[in-house]
Amino acid sequence: MRRAYNKGHWERARSHAFKIIHRPKEQELARSVMIRSFWNEENFHEVIRLNSLWGNAFQKLSELAVYSLNEQIPGNEKVHHPKILELHESQPMPKGLDLKWNSHDTSMNFLQEGNRLWMVHPHGWTYWDMPNDFLLATTHHDLLRLTAEILLYPWQKSTRTSLEGTRKLGTLPSLAFSAGTDSTAAALVMPEHTILGYHRRNFESILDHRNADRLLAFMTNEKAKTVVDISSNHELIRTYHFKQIGFSSDFACATHLILLADHFDIGAIAFGMPLDNTWLVKGRKFRQFQETPYFQYWKERFLKAGLDLLLPIAGISEAGAMEICQKEKVLPYLNSCLRGDGTNGCGDCWKCFLKNGPLGRPFDINGKEIQIFLKRRPLPTATHALWALQHLQLESKVPELSEYLEQDLSWWTCYYPPAKNILQERWQEETWNNISNYLSPMKQPYPVESVHYFGD
């Protein structure tokens, strides 16, 4: 029975289980094999029936079966995955003031208990564990309003309200630091006194912080960087809207820094957003990024809250970011894989292919996730994925991409000179000098301006 089950021979495993299911000592195991084999075959109706027949002994599996059946029926009202419901129910709530969601002035949705800053939203509470001397009372209302907009606007349009515009620009630059390759490259090209703000997801998930912790220690002890490590559960906000755990929007990874701007006198918040997502749309189509409504809106929105929106590596590709990290000898402490063991990557994820593979680290090109992404059209992170295939000499593994792999992509490690123009004057010189010391400029005509893969 065990051999059949472990080999995925579900019907044979059930046949063996049926022979021993009436023996008291074997009954629990036999029932488990039977119901789980039906689950593996996606026979969710039988999972639900057997759980009911056997006194709800497999309640969690049955709940998952109900959820899966619901997802398969078009037009069905959505239900939360049982694991998400468990996360929702396990989240803490403030013990003090009972605050109700205020859609008219979102700055009124915050309160502080000890070093924990709370924000109420239409579905519950989210929080940040701040430094011990943080004070909500001395935090400008526009910083609170900007935070609420970034986290809730995708679903609560009322959060896009006018800002007072009375907060003066602070003096220190900061970076939303993910401890990944792009983020690390941004930290290395930014001014020496940049504050690195790490967002720590503080609920159970597949994300593993151990790789990040090694780099945070290195940046603190060896690079003498100021690192601010803030725990929060705001990545759960999306799940109330039937989305996967993650950031509500592009800038959600910096909400802790926005909220700490007055505390640390922050005047700029930077993001490790590379060329792949600025002058290129999803790495596959060139655009004039500086003219996009997206950039224009958020640049002005941050500035209204007394913050420069700083994109130091907007003209550098993911490959260029990797080269910067190599030259600074950071690689022994850096691994972009979010599922690693504290030293190595998992070798099976898309990040291991894109980031670790070109650095000579092990990965499995035939891994399930990597193959899923390679077969998608349009190809995700297109230019960098093509460069990685070319760099790793894996063209034969993807013959369907041969027309795109015939071109020379060596320029992908060079920086795009026009990107200098979107850097604010007070941060521009030092940042750009650092970039120029690490990388070479693209030659005109700039090849990135001709990128247009997979149609529109």
Image: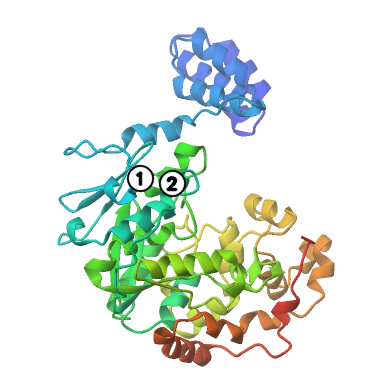
Q: Distance between the residues labelled 2 and 1?
A: 7 Å
Which mark identifies residue 92?
Answer: none
Where 91 sits versus 73, above or below?
A: below
Estimate how packed mark 1 is, as few (under 14), some (14 to 19) or many (20 or more) residues with alpha carbons within 10 Å.
Answer: few
- The location of residue 420, given as percent across then percent down, is 54, 85
Closer to the N terminus: mark 2 or mark 1?
1
Where 194 sits versus 254, above or below?
A: below
- The location of residue 267, given as percent across then percent down, is 33, 75
Q: Mark 1 points at which residue?
A: 104
Q: Which of 274 and 367 is in front in this view?
A: 274
Query: Which residue is drawn at the image coordinates 49% and 59% (left, top)?
Result: 250
Query: Which residue is drawn at the image coordinates 32% and 60% (left, top)?
Result: 142
Q: Which of 455 and 246 is in front in this view?
A: 455
Q: Name the residue under label 2.
A: 158
Residue 113 located left or right of residue 190: left
Where 441 sits versus 166, above or below?
A: below
- The location of residue 211, given as percent across then percent down, is 41, 63
- Asked which secondary structure carries label 2, the reply is helix
Residue 400 located left or right of residue 198: right
Q: Can residue 377 be seen in this view?
A: yes
